[in-house]
Image: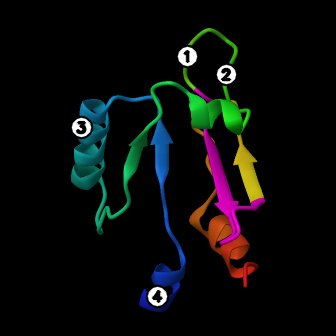
Amino acid sequence: MTKQQKEKVQILAVSVDSHEDSKKFAQMLRNRFEGEFDFPLLEDKDRKVINRYGIFNPDGSGWPHPSTYVIDPRGIVQWKFIEVDYKKRPSNEQIRQQLAKIK
């Protein structure tokens, strides 16, 4: 992603994890992958965001379905990827294609 593209995009990660668990996860990502990890991990311990987007996993685990959303500057969801299998995620290219559609 170019610098100009980064200025137009904000990445946020929302999780039921505590602040401390999120810090540990961020450190694991820094150790595992090259490049800058420069987006916030937000805590949703009351599951307000998870419930708002309808991604709560009713299987009893308490974890939401893994999801990726592209939301335009007006706050409108333009694209979403929701998966039951946590191992399946959208590719970077899929996300870039969706971001490119937003003016």
Alpha carbon separation for disc pair 1 and 3:
20 Å
Which amino acid lies under the numbered mark 4 shown in the image of this protein? Thr
Instruction: Find residue 12 and report its horizontal and vertical position in percent.
Output: 48, 55
Alpha carbon separation for disc pair 2 and 4:
35 Å
Residue on which the image places disc 2: 57
Q: Is residue 5 above or below residue 16?
A: below
Q: Give the residues drawn in magenta, as a range.
A: 64-78
Residue on which the image places disc 1: 62
Q: Is residue 76 above or below residue 82?
A: below
Instruction: Find residue 37 and report its horizontal and vertical position in percent.
Output: 31, 61
Depth check, front residue: 54 or 35? 54
From the image, which quarter does the C terminus lie in?
bottom right
Mark toward the viewer: 4 or 1: 1
Q: What residue is at 26 percent from the left and 43 percent from the top? A: 28
Which comes before the other along the chain, label 3 or label 2?
3
Alpha carbon separation for disc pair 1 and 2:
7 Å
Residue on which the image places disc 4: 2
Depth check, front residue: 8 or 88? 8
